[in-house]
Image: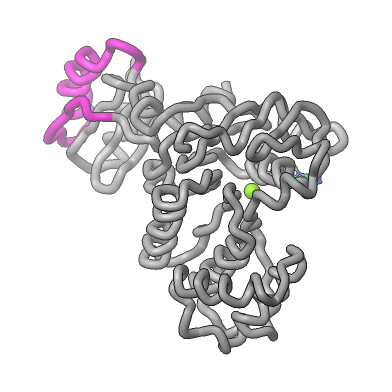
Amino acid sequence: MSSQELINAHDLHKAFGQNHAVNGVSFSVRAGEMYGLVGPDGAGKTTTMRLLCGALTLGGGQATIGGVDVKRQPERARAEIGYLPQRFSLYEDLTVMENIRFFAETRGLSNKDWRPRSQEILDFVGLGTFTERRAGQLSGGMKQKLGLAVALVHRPRVLLLDEPTTGVDPVTRQDFWQLIIRLSGEEGIGVLVSTPYMDEAARCHRLGFMRGGKLLLEGTPSEVRARLNGRIVEVVGGPLPVLRKICQVDPDVENAQMFGDRLHLRVKADRAGQVMARLASSIPAGGGELLAARPIASQLEDVFIALLESGNE
Ligand SMILES: Nc1ncnc2c1ncn2[C@@H]1O[C@H](COP(=O)(O)OP(=O)(O)O)[C@@H](O)[C@H]1O
Ligand SMILES: [Mg+2]
């Protein structure tokens, strides 16, 4: 069961006029797997999801959901998918339960099917006691949970969640992720989720990094981080803007970012030792104070910044 492939995307293409929004994207998501799509605005994440759920027609390539071809059997494929769009709109003047009912009926569920299911699913997302509240009176986080409930009402095996927690407070983000983890872990649902948050990306079993319509890099979070093993140097001292200027002119420093009260340098391969030795003299000479410089484990953020920059050269 756990090795079953629920999403298979092969060489997906979609252009809007001259704009190749999705340009040869291939990946797969297994049952019980959480696959994270990350990348800057305009990378093609939303378009990829819309191709998978049939909201857009494929310009090229092939996609199957639970083995069902999205192009040849769109209705059957769609029945396997729960989709929470990036800009999900509820009916604000309808209650929580009426919203569920509306979406269940558009999915073709009968009264007998959706009633017990809707209570179960509202309890699951923590809205079981809010069934009579108007959707317009829910907080942002509760609206997203209702969106998730709506996406789950027909018991899909695949969930497509497009930035489900963007703009949601940290506590609700945490709650929301506990739900996703349960859906994948306990129910074996295959989850494709896009997120701008690196802490969320780190929770996924596998990640795909998209830019310019292409999947540039794929792997587990630790595989992705390993791309920059030995190449991140943390610098502690002050004043930070002065340190940053000095570090940026070092010939082996590719990038210097502030991370809280310190700097993260990305250095050329095998140059960490030389960079640290030079900074020990260049920082005091430039009017800064160096308290510590040491190699540290790279974070997902470091890798993503490096990937973003690699396209701007
Ligand atoms: N319906 C559309 N019509 C025209 N262009 C679109 C449409 N949807 C997306 N695009 C363009 O396709 C590219 C990818 O967009 P999108 O998939 O929304 O990226 P992301 O979700 O990663 O921010 C962008 O350049 C965007 O402007
Ligand atoms: Mg998007």
Q: Residue at x 53, y 32 (%)?
A: 209
From the viewer's side, name the closer residue of 283 and 162: 162
Q: From this view, report whether residue 82 is shown above or below residue 28.
A: below
Q: Which residues are magenta?
A: 268-297
Residue that sits furthest to the bottom in the current view: 132
Q: Residue 43 placed where, x, y %?
A: 64, 38
**In the rendered view of the protein, which quadrant contains the C terminus?**
top right
Q: Position of residue 114 (x, y in %)?
A: 64, 72
Judge left or right: residue 295 versus residue 147.
left
> Is residue 246 positioned above or below 70 on the image?
above
Query: For the point 60% across and 49% down, which residue is it?
Result: 160
Displayed quadrant of residue 57? top right
Can you give x and y, in whole percent of width and height, for residue 302 in the image? 38, 32
By what rule are the colours in the image chosen?
Answer: one colour
Residue in view at x 48 percent, y 65 percent: 168
Q: Is residue 145 above or below residue 226?
A: below
Foreground residue among 243 and 144? 144
Reply yes or no: does residue 70 show up in magenta: no
Point 41% across, 67% down: residue = 172
- Identify which residue, 41 or 131, lies in the foreground: 131
Residue 54 placed where, x, y %? 77, 46
Q: Is residue 166 above or below residue 262?
A: below
- Judge left or right: residue 83 versus residue 185: right
